[in-house]
């Protein structure tokens, strides 16, 4: 790092002292920027627009609506005579885009209720080994709540 050219007009002795001071100030500024960026990243939990984990999936109203919609679509597309319901939320994330995107990984189980049932949470899961079927599903639901829009973008079950 070079000192400003104007410092050398003060004479060779003063120029050397000013150059040393300039290097020290420059190094101090770089160190402060690095420390600030490291300490700032500790407090920053996510980048704007990046998916964020939803810690308490059971109490997140938006996630629950998205999950209910995904399960309705899942059951509608299924050829099974029984409805399925979510047994456990493995992971859930929310991403703010032009609306809200919910990214969910859930365990789905076959219930004893036929497809015509409306309240699936009160339906018992099959317990007989040949009827019980747990499936892991990845759902991505996009919603624009202020326009009352919701769409299943991805449904991948194994």
Image (cartoon, helix red, strand yellow):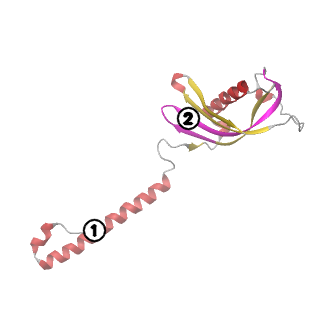
- What residue sits right under mark 1 in the picture? 25
Q: Nearer the viewer, mark 1 or mark 2?
A: 2
- Depth check: 79 or 43 in front? 79
Give the secondary structure at mark 2.
strand
Q: Is residue 150 above or below residue 108?
A: above
Q: State the image quarter where residue 123 is shown.
A: top right
- What residue sits right under mark 2 in the picture? 101
Looking at the image, do the residues carrying marks 1 and 2 touch, with CB atoms under 8 Å apart?
no
- Depth check: 96 or 128 in front? 128
Image quadrant containing the N terminus: bottom left
Dot 2 surroundings within 10 Å: few (below 14), some, or many (20 or more)?
Answer: many
Q: Residue at x 48, y 41 (%)?
A: 49
Residue 96 colored magenta? Answer: yes
Give the secondary structure at mark 1.
helix
Dot 1 surroundings within 10 Å: few (below 14), some, or many (20 or more)?
Answer: few
Q: Position of residue 108 (x, y in %)?
A: 75, 36
Q: Position of residue 107 (x, y in %)?
A: 73, 39
Q: Residue at x 49, y 35 (%)?
A: 97
The magenta span reads 92-115
């Amino acid at each position: 790092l070079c000192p400003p050219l104007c410092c050398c007009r003060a004479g060779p002795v003063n120029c050397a002292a000013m150059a040393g001071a300039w290097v020290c100030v420059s190094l101090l500024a770089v160190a402060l920027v690095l420390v600030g960026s490291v300490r700032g990243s500790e407090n920053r939990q996510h980048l704007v627009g990046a998916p964020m984990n939803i810690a308490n999936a059971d109490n997140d109203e938006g996630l629950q609506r998205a999950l209910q919609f995904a399960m309705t679509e899942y059951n509608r597309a299924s050829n099974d005579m029984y409805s399925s319901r979510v047994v456990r939320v493995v992971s859930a994330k929310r991403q703010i885009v032009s609306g809200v995107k919910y990214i969910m990984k859930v365990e789905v189980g076959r219930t004893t209720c036929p497809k015509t049932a409306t309240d699936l949470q009160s339906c018992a899961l099959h317990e007989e080994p040949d009827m019980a079927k747990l499936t892991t599903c990845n759902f991505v639901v996009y919603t624009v709540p202020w326009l009352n829009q919701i769409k299943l973008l991805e449904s991948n079950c194994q």
